[in-house]
Image (cartoon, grey):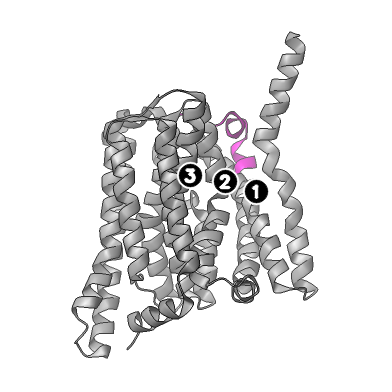
Amino acid sequence: MRKTANARSTTKHFLIEHGLDVLLVFVPIAAILHYSHASEFLVFAASGVAIIPLAGWMGKATESLAERLGAGIGGLLNATFGNAAEMIIAFQGLRAGLTEVVKASLTGSILGNILLVLGLSILGGGLKHKSQKFNSTAATMSATMMALSAIGLMVPAMFHWITGGEVAQERARAEANLSLEISIVLFATYILSLVFTLRTHKDLYLGTSRAHDESASMSPKTAAIILVVATGLVAWMSELLVGAVEPASRVLGLTEVFVGVILVAIIGNAAEHSTAVLMALKNQMDLAYHIAVGSSMQIALFVAPALVFLSYAIGRPMNLLFTSFEVVTVGLAVLIVSLVAVDGESNWMEGVLLLAVYLIFAIAFFFLPSHSLAGETSALYSG
């Protein structure tokens, strides 16, 4: 009986850890579909599915290197590669001139992590454990930093609305400078947050230091090779994905903003989704909260500013002007997550509430007319 139980436990653990690996078959499938000039929708679907397991392996390799190289370098690695899949997808979008989709994917990553990922984690953990506790001080600090992120998104839009009567060319120049300087502030704040979490107040985050057993078994050389290979494949699949976004949107009858906010964001964050839920099921709510909210913080404070800097480097400047609907949804999402985090305790009903908010936003983005988005976008970029 004991051997049977151990065998079942081993099988279950193996399926949990490697369940996504079967999707690696979509890497060659996506390449074959692309080079055989098959339907762009099929290329979009295959490349999107292929990115999911690759992002998972990037995460495992990064965790392994972070453990062995120490907290300081580990924090830098996590900042650089923690959201690498989203970063690569967004950069390929910038190169293709799909600024609207890129911004939508940033919004979607923030909403997806703090509502969908955290909601699923709290729900899953709450169904197994009556209530789960996490460090309220660390959680409140993360929520406050998310509020800063929301402010960073709101201010450029507010500036645009207030200066509506100004000369278009002068306003566009001012908005570009404003976005660049806000990006510098957000990026500097993220660097200081690493100092806070890894140096001066690392005791608040001890609950997030436990890592996966599998990642610890990798040698640094193996982890580095996996990281390089997976990053290269993600870049390749992202290029195919971005190239097929517009035709796939038409086939599905969806706006590019919905594709960016929901589909592309879920693809880029799939590995984090599964990891956070697994940690919550193991009653490691500190770690699950850190993965979900910390990833959103990285998107807003690290990835978004980095993309602004990169956009200038490739000669396609991107600003931080988001549509009013995106700004409102991020602000409301940060508000409800702050309410959940304030007491340092969670239950399954709070997970349901977060998921309900995410579904409401997703439904609204689905029904949002493309002409209204086009009208607002043209107003944002006029001049």
Residue 6 in the figure: left or right of residue 200: right
Rendered location of residue 351, percent (x, y): 43, 38
Rendered location of residue 248, percent (x, y): 64, 72
Q: Which mark is residue 117?
A: 3
Q: Give the extent of the magenta segment.
A: 210-225
Quarter of the picture holding the C terminus = bottom left
Frontmost residue, 332 versus 69: 332
> Is residue 318 visible to the viewer in this orientation of the structure?
yes
Q: Main secondary structure of the magenta part?
A: helix
| Mark toward the start of the polypeptide (1 vs 3) | 1
Above or below, comparing residue 315 to residue 136 in the picture: below
Amino acid type, residue under disc 2 in the picture: Ala
Give the residue at mark 1.
53
Identified at 65% across, 74% down, the residue is 251
Give the residue at mark 2.
271
Identified at 42% across, 73% down, the residue is 311
Residue 246 in the figure: left or right of residue 119: right
> Is residue 73 visible to the viewer in this orientation of the structure?
no
Real-space Cα separation, disc 1 to disc 2, in angstroms = 7 Å
Task: Determine crowd level at label 1: few under 14, some 14-19, many 20+ residues with C-alpha closer than 10 A.
Answer: many
1 and 2 marks in contact (CB < 8 Å)? yes
Identified at 72% across, 51% down, the residue is 24
Rendered location of residue 138, percent (x, y): 30, 35
Residue 327 in the figure: left or right of residue 107: left
**Magenta stretch holds residue 218:** yes
